[in-house]
Image (cartoon, helix red, strand yellow):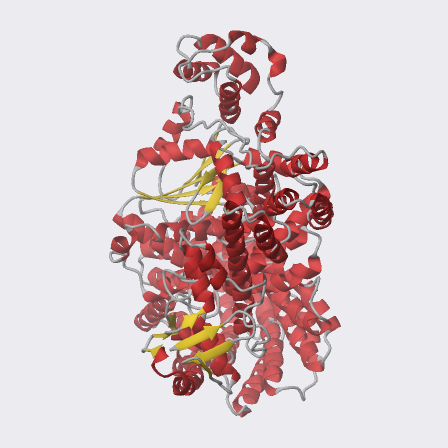
């Protein structure tokens, strides 16, 4: 028989004799299994004990450790291919079982509880394993909660026996674990007084009053103050029971009236590819209208809400909508019918791990968006799908970007997107999305106005048929048509007794205007004033947590026992100030309730509560801290602890980056700088720079990279930051600055960094276009350095060869260009998925340049293969290039319809993914299609727009090519100017093929000029 003692210093007995495991990790494994009542997965143990080892190495170490433990414990250690378990008598397990028994006796509790508040596994740790240390901290805190709960139950049993001294001792042990539980402090004061220690009871109150002020910035509840007053005046009765304040329960909601026009508009305008946006002030009925619309639609509804306190969490409303959907009973049957490739399931796993394991590939925003779009579109092929995002004004930037993408990708399936919002701020991200959707004719705005008097009268008739008119007049006068205020007034009237369930009304009360609160805020405050102190304490804690809140969190923040919190929540539920959700969670009835509660918190109280929420999340989610890191950052920041928030900001930034949510990642990295060590600062600044760069903010990225260079503590850090800065400058067209930066790097640095510097140098020269010979020289030097490395990176070699092909193509040497692309393809193909981008792009560029040589069949084969590879690998960001080439192949084949479709698809993606060079190139291609259709006016428009875009970007080769296409369509003088500009660019770069094209156009224009009219 194996017995394990986890409370205090750990002890293991076999047949009542102590046994010893000499290796610390063997003991850690034993203790971990002992703390679990159910078998644990081997994978969990590998991560817990050997987090820094390769999986194969960790598996071998686990096998060795299991052998050692089995030598000591024998068959008590149970192991199979998937799980591990320990068959033993464990004190922690025994306590859990006793507490789960509603009939547990004094004897059962006293034998199961430790004699005093004692730490689990005291004196034991595993400092070189952060996951184990995190688990250990969590299990210690959970055990403390269990012990406190046990002593409270024991105190009640002792009091029932009239053993007041024993009951008071039990309460004192519970309070030593958490002294802020006000209801328990109140019981201890009462028992001390009843046990003859009046002075001790008074002292307890004074000490607790000081503790509350220090920790929470609040005074004792009125129930506690009343008890103290009774003790002081010796008027406390011999027994006392908690006083429960009753609340009037108003079940149900007002009838849905007065929105027929808006509902009809939603039903008429609901089409794929459109956003139905319901706008209005708080309380106007936006969510109710959306719910009524969805109730009439049928189909599959996915619903998520953006929250003010969670707007920095990437994809929060989408994540919650998907997670809730896949938890439904019908999901397994639906899942089996969805035809999605594994790559898209794994990508969805980034957001909802229950769907699939997240991929190991680097995060890519385009691929994640496409995965979500394909998932919803595939669902919509099974049944009509409705996606609701409530309170869109609080949505994060990444969610808003995804929403726009989703609308463009769902025009041919039964997917309807609906959202509610308050009037957006003029310069907000939401306002920008609205402008874009209006321009694209993808938005239906339903602006809710106040209820008309006729609608108010209809409501009044349903509440009181006999006195409908005076009731309607009263509601109209005080609510001014706001449905939420109407609802609150009805609630107020029922509580006051002015409106009875059978429809009778107190007309004299309705005529006395002064008795009615003057605003919705006062109405809500009137409801709050009737709450008990505990209920108000819970409400204050909950409003700081957020619209949705967990029982465990508010219990810890409110400084109440679990029983007192449950009683308070019952009171709040009865008052319909909060509503029940699942899994021990609750939700405020309306954002306006939150606003009233929140604004009544003083500044000091506000900060202290935010700190306590942060600490509660730390303690309760320690084993999955990354999930709540962003929320902890918010609460510690609001609590005035930026340095405490910094560590979690770094975690939240990494989590956002793993989702390619770059705007949110950048915000978190910025917050992390408030508390990082000097040795980390350059690295965090560099990560901030990349997040900004990927978010499209190249200018801000430049600032971060420059600062990273300035604070670098080692030459290596400085070089890494310098190279990062060079990468950020290229999309800004600052090629001279790139050349200056990389040319100053010491040639004797790490070879891979040297190769990267040379590559950037050559790329800058190539894009600048003034000296393609020098660009080729730098790139060939980079290639030589890479090949000299012991283990050359295939992706880097393929990229260099690819860029050399681009330069050869600009110079008109298509044979050399194609040979270089073939070399890039060969290197990339040998590397496999690690060089997938270059496998695709090398085929694309081969296709384009073979097309220029007239090899249409070969070009078609290559671009088809490139599109297939990109689809399989989910490379959405390169699709604009591939679709551009595919369109040009179709154009060469005379298939103008296919060419137009390909170009339009590519232009939409290039715009969506902010690839301005491809936007210009594909716009020019559409001009060539228009020319084939004989529409010269449209062709000139497209080509002129594309030329302006290319010149703005500094894309000299593209700009010269567009000038050559545009010149024959312009008046002679303007045509000569454009050709002269193109020739200057071509001569500066030695672009022979472009020079030949310019000469050909000049000759054609000259012939036109000499033809007799």
Give the residue at x 66% y 70%: 725
Give the residue at x 50% y 23%: 491
In this rendering, the count of numbered labels is 0
Residue 877 in picture, x, y percent from top left: 46, 63
The answer to whether residue 952 of the structure is visible from this angle is yes
Q: Quadrant of the N terminus?
A: bottom left
Dividing the picture into quadrants, the one containing residue 265 is: top left
The answer to whether residue 846 of the structure is visible from this angle is no
862 or 251: nearer the viewer: 251
Residue 422 in picture, x, y percent from top left: 54, 35
Q: Is residue 141 left or right of residue 4?
A: right
988 or 266: nearer the viewer: 266
Q: Is residue 508 left or right of residue 58?
A: right
Residue 159 in picture, x, y percent from top left: 53, 47
Q: Compared to 208, does 292 lie above or below? A: above
Residue 12 in picture, x, y percent from top left: 47, 78
386 or 167: nearer the viewer: 167
Q: Is residue 996 left or right of residue 408?
A: right
Q: Is residue 515 left or right of residue 846?
A: right
Q: Compared to 208, does 478 lie above or below? A: above
């Amino acid at each position: 028989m194996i017995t394990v003692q986890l409370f205090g210093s750990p002890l293991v007995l076999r047949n009542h004799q102590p046994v010893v495991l000499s290796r610390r990790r063997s003991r850690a494994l034993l203790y971990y299994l002992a703390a679990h009542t159910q078998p644990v997965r081997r994978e969990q143990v590998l991560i817990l004990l050997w987090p820094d080892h390769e999986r194969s190495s960790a598996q071998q170490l686990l096998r060795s450790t299991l052998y050692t433990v089995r030598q000591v414990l024998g068959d008590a250690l149970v192991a199979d291919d998937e799980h591990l378990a320990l068959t033993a008598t464990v004190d922690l397990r025994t306590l859990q079982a006793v507490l789960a028994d509603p009939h547990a006796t004094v004897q059962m509790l006293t034998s199961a509880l430790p004699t005093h508040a004692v730490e689990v596994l005291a004196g034991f740790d595993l400092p070189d394993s952060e996951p184990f240390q995190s688990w250990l901290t969590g299990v210690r805190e959970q055990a403390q909660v269990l012990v406190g709960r046990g002593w409270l139950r024991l105190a009640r049993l002792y009091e029932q026996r009239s053993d007041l001294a024993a009951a008071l001792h039990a309460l004192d042990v519970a309070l030593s674990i958490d002294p802020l539980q006000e209801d328990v402090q109140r019981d201890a004061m009462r028992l001390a007084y009843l046990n003859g220690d009046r002075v001790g009871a008074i002292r307890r109150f004074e000490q607790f009053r000081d503790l509350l002020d220090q920790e929470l910035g609040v005074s004792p509840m009125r129930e506690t103050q009343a008890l103290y007053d009774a003790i002081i005046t010796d008027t406390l009765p011999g027994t006392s029971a908690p006083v429960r304040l009753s609340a009037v329960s108003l079940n149900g909601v007002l009838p849905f009236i007065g929105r027929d026009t808006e509902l009809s508009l939603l039903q008429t305008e609901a089409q794929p590819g459109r956003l139905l946006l319901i706008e209005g002030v708080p309380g106007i009925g936006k969510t109710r209208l959306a719910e009524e619309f969805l109730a009439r639609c049928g189909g599959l509804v996915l619903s998520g809400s953006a929250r003010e306190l969670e707007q920095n969490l990437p994809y929060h409303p989408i994540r919650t909508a998907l997670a809730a959907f896949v938890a439904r009973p019908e999901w397994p049957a639906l899942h089996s019918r969805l035809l999605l490739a594994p790559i898209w399931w794994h990508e969805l796993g980034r957001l909802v791990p229950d769907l699939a394991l997240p991929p190991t590939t680097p995060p890519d925003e385009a691929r994640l968006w496409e995965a979500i779009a394909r998932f919803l579109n595939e669902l919509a092929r099974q049944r009509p799908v409705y996606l609701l995002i409530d309170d869109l004004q609080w949505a994060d930037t990444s969610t808003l970007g995804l929403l726009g993408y989703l609308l463009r990708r769902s025009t041919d399936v039964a997917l309807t997107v609906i959202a509610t919002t308050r009037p957006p701020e003029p310069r907000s991200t939401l306002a920008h999305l609205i402008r874009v959707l209006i321009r694209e004719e993808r938005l239906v705005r339903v602006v809710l106005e106040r209820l008309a008097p006729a609608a108010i009268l209809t409501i009044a008739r349903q509440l009181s048929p006999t006195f409908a008119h005076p009731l309607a007049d009263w509601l109209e006068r005080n609510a001014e048509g706001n449905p939420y205020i109407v609802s609150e007034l009805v609630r107020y009237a029922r509580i006051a007794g002015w409106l009875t369930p059978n429809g009778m009304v107190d007309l004299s009360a309705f005529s006395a205007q002064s008795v009615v609160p003057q605003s919705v805020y006062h109405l809500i405050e009137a409801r709050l004033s009737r709450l008990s102190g505990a209920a108000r304490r819970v409400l204050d804690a909950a409003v700081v947590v957020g619209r949705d809140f967990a029982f465990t969190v508010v219990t810890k923040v409110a400084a109440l026992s679990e029983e007192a919190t449950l009683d308070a929540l019952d009171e709040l539920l009865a008052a319909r100030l909060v509503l029940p959700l699942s899994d021990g969670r609750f939700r405020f009835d309306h954002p306006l309730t939150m606003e009233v509660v929140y604004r009544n918190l003083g500044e000091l109280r506000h900060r202290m509560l935010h700190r306590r929420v942060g600490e509660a999340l730390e303690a309760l989610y320690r084993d999955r801290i990354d999930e709540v890191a962003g929320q902890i950052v918010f609460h510690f920041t609001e609590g005035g602890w930026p340095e405490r928030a910094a560590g979690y900001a770094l975690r939240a930034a990494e989590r956002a980056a793993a989702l390619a949510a770059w705007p949110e990642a950048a915000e978190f990295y910025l917050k992390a700088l408030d508390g990082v060590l000097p040795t980390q600062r350059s690295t965090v600044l560099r990560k901030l720079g990349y997040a900004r760069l990927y978010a499209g903010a190249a200018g801000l990225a430049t600032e971060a990279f420059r600062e990273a260079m300035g604070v670098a503590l080692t030459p290596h850090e400085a070089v890494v930051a310098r190279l990062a800065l060079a990468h950020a400058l290229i999309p800004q067209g600052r090629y001279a600055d790139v050349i200056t930066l990389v040319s100053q790097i010491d040639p004797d640095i790490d070879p891979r960094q040297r190769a990267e510097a040379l590559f950037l140098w050559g790329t800058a020269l190539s894009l600048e276009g003034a000296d393609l010979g020098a660009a080729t020289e730098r790139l060939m030097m980079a290639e030589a350095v890479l090949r000299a490395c012991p283990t050359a990176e295939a992706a880097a070699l393929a990229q260099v060869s690819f860029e050399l092909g681009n330069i050869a193509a600009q110079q008109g040497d298509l044979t050399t260009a194609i040979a270089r692309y073939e070399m890039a393809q060969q290197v990339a193909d040998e590397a496999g998925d690690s060089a997938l981008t270059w496998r695709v792009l090398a085929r694309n560029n081969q296709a384009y340049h073979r097309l220029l040589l007239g090899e249409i069949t070969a070009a078609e084969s290559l671009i088809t293969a490139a599109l297939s590879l990109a689809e399989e690998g989910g490379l959405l960001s390169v699709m604009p290039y591939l679709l551009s080439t595919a369109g040009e192949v179709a154009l060469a084949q005379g298939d103008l319809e296919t060419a137009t479709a390909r170009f339009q698809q590519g232009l939409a993606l290039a715009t969506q993914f902010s690839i301005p060079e491809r936007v210009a190139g594909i716009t020019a291609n559409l001009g060539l299609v228009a020319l084939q259709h004989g529409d010269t006016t449209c062709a000139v428009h497209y080509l002129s727009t594309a030329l302006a875009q290319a010149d703005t970007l500094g894309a000299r080769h593209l700009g010269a090519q567009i000038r050559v296409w545009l010149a024959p369509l312009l008046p002679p003088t303007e045509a000569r100017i454009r050709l002269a500009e193109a020739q200057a660019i071509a001569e500066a770069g030695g672009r022979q093929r472009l020079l030949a094209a310019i000469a050909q156009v000049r000759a054609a224009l000259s012939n036109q000029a000499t033809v007799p009219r």
